[in-house]
Amino acid sequence: MLSSSSLLRAVIAASLISLPAPANVCAAGAPPVVQGGDVIGPRATAVPDPEGEALVVEFGSMLKEWNERRVRLSRGGKTPDPKELGPHPALAFRARFDALLAKDSGWAQCWWLDNLQHLTPDSDLPGRKRVFVELYDKLLARNASQQYMMFVLGAVKVHRSTLGADETDAMLDRLVQASTNHEVQARAAYMRAAFHAPADPKADPARMEEAVEMHRGVVANWPSTVAAKESAGVVLPGLQREFERREAAWLERCFELQRQGADPKTWPAQPVHELHPLIQPLAGVGLPGAVRWVNRVHNGYVNLEPQGPAAALTQLASALGSTYPVPDSDVVGLRLGLCELILRQFPDDPATERLIDDLLKDFPAVPPSVAEARLAPLFESSDSHRKAIGFHFMVRSCSAVGRWPGYVAALEWSERMARECPGDPLLQRTQKACATVRSLMPGEPAPEIAAEDLERKWFKLSDYKGRVVMLLFCNLFLDQGFDEAAKWQEFATKNASRPFSIVAMNAGSASPDAFFGKYAKLGVSWRTGLLFAASEDVLRRYMVASYPTIVVIDAEGKLRGRDLSWDETKALLEQWIADAEAKGKK
């Protein structure tokens, strides 16, 4: 439905007709080709319609008042009383717009299409479709280039199910042919492409490819339009996946040639050259991701090619870092693959030093197994500092896992670095990063926590000395940390008479009332501390990166284990509860 502000803008723009331009109808699967003016068909001629414009503005004012009344009557989730709300304003204006229809008013035709659901019965959908097509074709005859055809396209989308897929496609096709307004043509062509795409692209890849080709046609034929930029956004992800596929194949081939001792001059051409002609048009319409890909990935590589493959590939590896321009792209593995290739083939090139410096500033979060495989040349290096850099990267990679096994692995890499690279400038920095891990090793005292519970009573973790504690970190705001709550409560109930307690710590912003409702639903009863302002400090001291995080603390207040499966956690709890009972009998 048109708002009054939209209608006013439409009134102002109604008389603005774009200059004649080549139009194109891109058939499904056909390559985008700009057609000449001699094959477009008759040009539509705009017809001045001041009476229609004025009536639309008047209608918009009444519609605004009606909508405000509807919102007011709907407060509190109420259904508005039809008598108090009154009928939709379209019904009151119908006779006046019908009179303009008799004069072939484009504004009246547009208004009718926009309000068709209020003016025709839902029980007669064939009749509604007939009226829609008749009015639509009248608009195309003389007003196809009017800016308000954008609103008509909105009506086409609303009534698409009534019109049917084939009729909708034909209507959009006719508008592309008849209009000379670039934005209108491009929007109609964009809608054709969008409607052609299957609901599940993976189930019908051929049809999806046809839709993508239609979007390419929008980009090629109307590059200065908003719709072209939107179509470019549809096309780019597929090209990105193709780039990644070709880059992975290129790396595999180059590693094979490198192992054979082949000269880098015999390596195949970089895929950035192959993908550039396909992504450049998307950059030409102003799609930010495509612009940055062309500037950073392609142009950055090409500009350094004269300096040799080491310099160019180093630049490419840098461009595939955290500032890589394409969203939702998985290029981390490719980037580290490039790094390994450079380290193996050009270990002494100055560009390789720049590569290592770039990695120190922007090391990707990758699984430790991937990092260890790709950084093998650093561990194998006779250069002590390079080896230290490799160890440092492994500490960062293991720490990024965010769970206790990763933290322990990071500490082990740090200790190996201390043994093999003593005195390296990175050693102190790396060991500092692992200091918290050392403080959380089994047998160390659990860091103190003070918090207010759900009943507004302050307590400390040390209050539970003498009892084994299952310390549970959760986040009600994110609704994380409660998946196995029933199992934990069952264990707590079973061991109610033993020296055992579950103590939760909520890191999110949630009121006690929210917790009471959550706990009533889950059937749990453990004490929960609300960290609030202390959240960041507590989570840092316990190295909590995800929820739930469960820490087992013995009766003496010492850490005994964390981040285990529930079966492992339960066994550990049983062990230390029995230990506490045995000591209590002495």
Image (cartoon, rainbow, N blue to C red):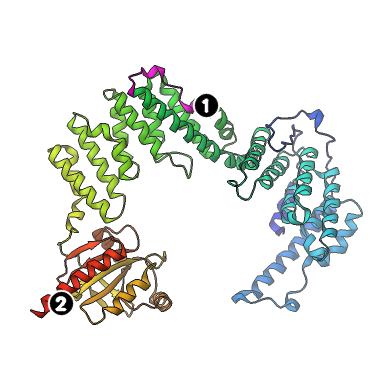
Q: Secondary structure at mark 2?
A: helix
Q: Image height check: is 433 above or below 470?
A: above
**Do the residues bearing badges 2 and 1 touch, measured as CB atoms within 8 Å?**
no
Q: Secondary structure at mark 1?
A: helix
Residue ID at (33%, 24%): 259
Quadrant location of the N terminus? bottom right
- Between residues 577 and 326, which one lies in front from this camera angle? 577
Residue 564 appearing in the image? yes
Circle on res. 156: none
Q: Give how far across and how far down residue 147 sits, in percent.
A: 74, 46
Q: Image height check: is 223 above or below 444?
A: above
- Between residues 420 and 4, which one lies in front from this camera angle? 420
**Residue type highlighted by circle 2:** Glu
Quadrant location of the C terminus? bottom left
Magenta residues (range): 259-272
Give the left or right position of residue 167, taking residue 235 as reference. right
What distance separates the C-alpha of mark 2 from that of mark 1?
A: 71 Å
Number of residue marks:
2
Q: Give how far across and how far down residue 546 sits, in percent.
A: 34, 59
**Earlier-in-chain disc, 2 versus 1:** 1
Q: Give how far across and how far down residue 521 sits, in percent.
A: 43, 77
**Residue type highlighted by circle 1:** Glu
Residue ID at (61%, 75%): 77
Dot 1 surroundings within 10 Å: few (below 14), some, or many (20 or more)?
A: few
Q: Which residue is mark 2?
A: 581
- Between residues 345 and 533, which one lies in front from this camera angle? 345
Q: Which residue is mark 1?
A: 274
Residue ID at (41%, 77%): 513
Q: Image height check: is 227 above or below 163?
A: above
**In this view, the mark in front (2 or 1):** 2
